[in-house]
Each structure stands twice: as C-alpha cells, then as structure tokens.
C-alpha cells in the first residue's frame, strides 16, 4: 500500500562533478536516496578503497544540491560519528554483517541502519545480526538482500534470493530492500530482478547508477547509466501485470 522507495547512485564517490551529476539524474527519475561509498571494503587490498573523509564532503554537497537522503557504509566504529554527520541512513555491508561490536555501536545511536545480508549468511544469522542492533536500542533497521554466494559464479556475481522476501515478511516486521546490482553483477540483468523484487513485495530497491560505467573505479559492470535508470523507473511505475513485458 505504499510506494517502493528507490536508492540509487554509484558504488564509490569518485569526484564532485560525478556525484552531483548522478544525484541530479537519479532524483529527477524518482529516487529518494543517494548511495555512494566513501569507505569501500574490497576483496583485494590493491583495489580502490574509496576517498574516505573527503568523499563524505562530496556526499554532503550532493545532498545540499538535490535534497536527497544519503546512504553510505560504515566500516569502522572509529568513523561512525563523522559519517553520521552526513548520512541519513548508515549502511552495514555484507562483510560486516557479523561484526558484532560494530553492530552494537551503530545500535547505540539513533540513525536508521541498512543491514546487508552476508554473502554466505543464513536468514537466521541475518536476523540475529539485526537483533544486535535492535537490542542496543535502535529500532530502525532495514534488511537488504544483495545476493548470496552459491555454486555458479560464471554468469552472475551472486544469487539474488528473492525467496527471502516472503520469508522475512512472515518472520519480521522490518522493512525489506533488494539490491539487484550486487545480486546479479551485470547491468543487463538488473531491471528484470528489480521488477521481480517489486512483484514479490519488496519495500525498497538499491540500484547502482554511474554516468560512465565503463570508467567507474568500482563495480562498473553492474551499474546502470542514468538513461537506463530512467527507463527502469518508468517501468516500475506501470501496473504489476505489465512489469514482465
């Protein structure tokens, strides 16, 4: 009975022109929140790790320019206060889902928490991670399914578990977000899985958008262009019976 909230933006904040251009485009298309990584956990220590505190300043500039809410990741409790000054929602990434000391810290402050499911986490483990935040006093937790690691990684980055939506609806009152960008790893598959998530009852979507995915410093392959994001947002506004067309 409510609109699906869409969060969109690049994997990483790269420079001021890029983040503001992206923020303007995704807002014009209907997004309510801008995502962008200031601090990036990467599998390789040699991969781009984000610009850190300077990227937070760029997110603040994008927020001032567009009025969008900001969602960005907290990797270390030492950075929590400065991130909370800029972010409207604090993200706990998949790699930190069971970083219990960090969960306690974010649970002790009032900003809403976006809790991504760990790459190999069961639904019970995910919900217990959420309980760490809730038990610390913060009731504002959003659960984000972003794909889990299964057998076949040749054709998709992860396996997007849309079956988690009705299961979570049965088990918890917490709102559910789906991230089809990480869930598939390829931009061409993102629109179909975003539509499927809405049809299954998701409350929100997180979509990676970059003005030039081929030159993105991280996750370019799964990022939509602003024009592709426009098309997806228009498709999501159609009746559910036409979403598969």
Image (spheres, rainbow, N blue to C red):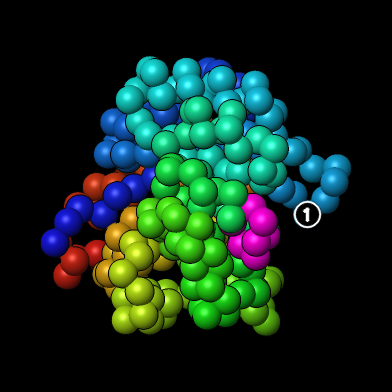
Q: Residue at x 67, y 82 (%)?
A: 151
Q: Quadrant of residue 190?
A: bottom left
Instruction: Report the side of 76 relative to 46 (left or right).
Output: left
Q: Nearer the viewer, residue 217 or 52?
A: 52
Residue, disc 1? 43
Residue 148, given in percent of the width and then of the height, sits at 59, 72
Q: Residue at x 64, y 68 (%)?
A: 119
Q: Residue at x 43, y 42 (%)?
A: 111
Q: Is residue 108 visible?
A: yes
Q: Residue at x 42, y 37 (%)?
A: 88
Instruction: Report the side of 119 relative to 62 (left or right).
Output: right
Q: Quadrant of residue 23?
A: top left
Residue 39, given in percent of the width and then of the height, sits at 67, 38
Residue 220, given in percent of the width and then of the height, sits at 61, 44
| Image quarter of the N terminus | bottom left
Q: Nearer the viewer, residue 136 or 77?
A: 136
Residue 17 lies in the magenta-colored region: no
Residue 100 lies in the magenta-colored region: yes
Q: Is residue 187 visible?
A: no
Q: Which residues are magenta?
A: 97-103
Mark 1 surroundings within 10 Å by alpha-carbon count, few (fewer than 14), some (14 through 19), many (20 or more)? few
What secondary structure is marked by label 1? loop
């Amino acid at each position: 009975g409510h609109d699906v909230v869409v969060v969109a933006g690049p994997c990483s904040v790269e420079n001021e022109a890029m983040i503001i251009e992206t923020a303007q485009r995704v807002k014009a298309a209907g997004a309510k929140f801008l995502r962008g990584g200031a601090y990036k956990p990467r599998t390789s220590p040699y991969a781009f790790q984000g610009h850190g505190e300077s990227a937070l300043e760029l997110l603040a500039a994008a927020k001032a320019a567009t009025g969008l809410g900001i969602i960005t990741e907290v990797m270390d409790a030492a950075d929590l206060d400065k991130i909370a000054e800029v972010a409207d929602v604090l993200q706990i990434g998949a790699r930190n889902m069971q970083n219990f000391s960090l969960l306690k810290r974010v649970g002790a402050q009032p900003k809403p928490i976006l809790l991504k499911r760990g790459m190999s986490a069961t639904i019970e483990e995910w919900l217990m991670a959420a309980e760490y935040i809730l038990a610390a006093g913060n009731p504002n937790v959003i659960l984000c399914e972003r794909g889990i690691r299964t057998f076949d990684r040749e054709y998709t980055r992860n396996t997007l578990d849309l079956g988690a939506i009705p299961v979570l609806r049965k088990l918890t009152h917490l709102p559910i977000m789906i991230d089809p960008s990480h869930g598939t790893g390829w931009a061409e598959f993102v629109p179909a899985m975003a539509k499927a998530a809405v049809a299954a009852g998701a409350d929100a979507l997180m979509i990676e958008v970059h003005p030039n995915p081929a030159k993105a410093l991280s996750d370019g392959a799964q990022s939509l262009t602003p024009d592709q994001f426009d098309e997806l947002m228009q498709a999501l506004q159609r009746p559910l019976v036409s979403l598969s067309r």
